[in-house]
Amino acid sequence: MAESVLDVRALPKDVAYKQLSAHVAAVLDGINDSIAAMATMSCLLYHGFGYLWVGFYRVVESNTLLRVGPYQGSLGCMEIRFGAGVCGMAAVARRTVIVPDVTTFPGHISCDARSRSEIVVPVFDTQRNLLAVLDIDSELPNAFDDVDRRWLEQLVAYFGRSQPLKRGEAQ
Ligand code: SME
């Protein structure tokens, strides 16, 4: 069992995500539980990178409504409709959306006025149904790029596996 939370802020992104992904796999070793996984990923990403907000919005009405799930950070909005904000847009498009500057994104939902940039990654279950979206907010503009997208999509691939990850199986 990995006990402490890694701070990966000083590392190059690829190294940081590699370490974090290995840590997630170690903590979730043998656990096949989506809520436990959402909570663990939120915690490790939030503390690892020092982001403003990290968490999941879960699909509670198919193609209609997202509701907040496990997260870390300031108080999140409770519900977001498909198509609304960055989360709702990613949910409809079923693809990752990166917003370098939230002030120029039409319809951005501001849960915390300090947020400057954002990435939202769709989360699929084993049947490729949309289960949730992973939302990360940064106080810095332009904090997210294709490297984040790639690693975060790999991380949430956890939810599309029928078998739990084993320690040491992180990508
Ligand atoms: N900014 C998001 C809303 C969720 S909060 O950032 C936690 C959006 O526009 O969908």
Image (cartoon, rainbow, N blue to C red):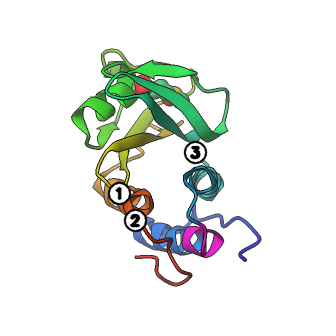
Image height check: is 114 above or below 169? above
Which quadrant, please, contains the C terminus?
bottom left
Pointers 1 and 2 in contact (C-beta within 8 Å): yes
| Mark 3–mark 2 distance (CA, rounded to whole Å) | 27 Å
- Magenta-colored stretch includes residue 27: yes
In the image, farthest residue toward the bottom: 168
| Sooner in the amino-acid sequence: mark 3 or mark 1 | 3
In the image, farthest residue toward the left: 93
Q: Which residue is mark 3?
A: 51
Instruction: Name the residue located 45 percent from the left edge and 21 percent from the top edge.
Output: 80
Q: Which mark is residue 101?
A: none
Q: Which residue is mark 2?
A: 161
| Mark 1–mark 2 distance (CA, rounded to whole Å) | 6 Å
Q: Secondary structure at mark 1?
A: loop
Q: Point out the frontmost of discs 3 and 2.
A: 2
Q: Position of residue 57 (x, y in %)?
A: 49, 34
Q: Position of residue 21 (x, y in %)?
A: 50, 69
| Sooner in the amino-acid sequence: mark 1 or mark 2 | 1
Q: Position of residue 11 (x, y in %)?
A: 52, 69
Q: Which residue is mark 1?
A: 126
Would you say the beta carbon of the disc 1 residue lies within 8 angstroms of ligand 1?
no
Which quadrant, please, contains the N terminus?
bottom right
Q: Tell me the magenta residue range.
A: 24-31
How many marks on residues?
3
Image height check: is 138 above or below 167? above
